[in-house]
Image: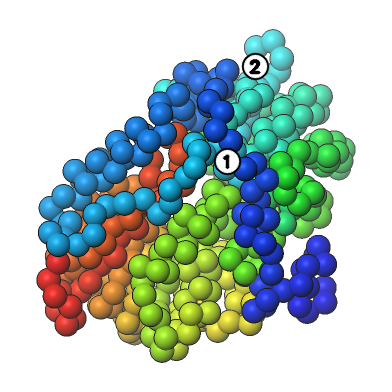
Amino acid sequence: MERGTNHLGQRTRNAGIDVEPSRQLGQGFGPDTSPLSCPNFGTCGGCVSLTTPYATQREALRQRVEEQLGPWLPRDGPPVSFTDRPAAPPRHDRTRILYPVQPHPQLGLTMGLFRRGTHTPVEIDACELQHPALTELGARALPVLRRSGLRPYDETRHTGQVRAFSARLAPSTGELLLGIVTAEPRLDGAEALATALLAAASGLPDAGGPAIVPVGLVHNIQTRRGNALVGAESHALSGRMTLQACSDGLLLRIGFASFYQLHRAVDRLLYDPAMQMLGDLQGARVIDGYGGVGCFALRAARAGAARVMLVEASRSACDDARHNAAHNELSVDVVEGAFSADTCSELAADVLVVDPSRAGLGEVGCSAVRSVAAPRVLYASCGLPALRRDLERLPEYGVAEVRLADLFPHTGHVETLVLLHRRSGGFPPC
């Protein structure tokens, strides 16, 4: 690939992609103000409040955050608020599907989103949350898997082969990465299956963004008992094991096993507001805990931080982060390991960013925060109960600001951005 262009031949800027904002976000939909409706609503567990007025949903989320975080909210600080003001209820924003595959008494196998309150899939032929291409792909892939003759996995008996079907889309580039998860290393008829699934992924609706192009099919192996769908071992059945996404002028490589946010407008809703909350980073020492493929770290380096260190436990994400830093010509030191006091004992920072899983920081992560002792901490949380527990463990810090990014519309979940100031670091108490 020529330096200064991406695989689509688009010119790059600051080693990223110079794409018009609407294209970069994959927004070909426009502000659709028509009522939300789904034939699976009430049965499928993918969302819980689709028919509730969107303003009502958001106010309920805001009030819940205020109630849960009330003891920590600053008296004279800005009110809890969302990072956007949408012109219409969001739809078709989810950029990944992970459908469990299970036995079906008449048709051999079935797959889809779990029925509400169960581990039984509902076959999905319409969805207001997922990108239309992913819903269409899932509907096309189901008969392919049925014709393959592969046995579906039975989680109660630990028998069968196929556990899940997945697909991740980068609407900004049109790249689509498929995955098939099996309960054993052997995959009978792998070549024919790959050919059929990739054919099913051709000609998908692009919804006004770049044409969708499947770039690879990954075979993931999950041998453990239970309902965990994805394992640690993967290899390519066809094409690549990564896709590329344009993100706020950066070109990111994202591996099959690497975490990446699932909302097509994540830059506008999460990363841009987060950087605004952090303020001036010129000359700062920054640590990005739970750094993933580098979404925060790369932005900090681009904002003029003197040193940026990314800590991440996933080997796949670390490989992607190193690649992304080099490709975007930004200096980021990547440390592979858990975010812990042991990992961070020798590290010092002016700014710390933490973006843990729904389980939160826990004792180990909070110990690492205390060890780094950064004056400013930005905590991105997707689990409100865990965030509350972590704030109780960090009395050294006071909350300066809270903002909400609606990355999971119509579900009852919300991403919470919390800016913390260390009480002993020269900042006024919050």
Most foreground residue, 372 or 125? 125
- Front disc: 2 or 1: 1
Say whether residue 291 is visible. Answer: yes
Residue type (three-letter) at the residue carrying disc 2: His
Q: Is residue 195 left or right of residue 295?
A: right
Residue type (three-letter) at the residue carrying disc 1: Pro
Q: Is residue 186 left or right of residue 117?
A: right
SS for dot 1? loop
Image coords of residue 44 (percent x, y): 51, 23
The correct choice, above or below, for 212 with respect to 284 in the image is: above
Q: Is residue 368 left or right of residue 72?
A: right
Image coords of residue 62 (percent x, y): 29, 43
Say whether residue 358 is visible. Answer: no
Question: Dividing the picture into quarters, in which one does residue 289 lie?
Answer: bottom left
According to the picture, the residue beneath numbered tag 2 turns out to be 104
Image coords of residue 321 (percent x, y): 58, 70
Image coords of residue 399 (percent x, y): 21, 63
Name the colouring of the figure. rainbow
Question: Dividing the picture into quarters, in which one does residue 395 lie?
Answer: bottom left
| Mark 2 or 1, nearer chain start | 1
According to the picture, the residue beneath numbered tag 1 turns out to be 31
Most foreground residue, 415 or 268? 268
The correct choice, above or below, for 128 with respect to 315 in the image is: above
Quarter occupied by the N terminus:
bottom right
For image coordinates 40% across by 76% down, the residue present is: 287
For image coordinates 57% across by 18% down, the residue present is: 39
The correct choice, above or below, for 124 with respect to 244 in the image is: above
For image coordinates 63% across by 22% down, the residue present is: 123
Most foreground residue, 152 or 54? 54
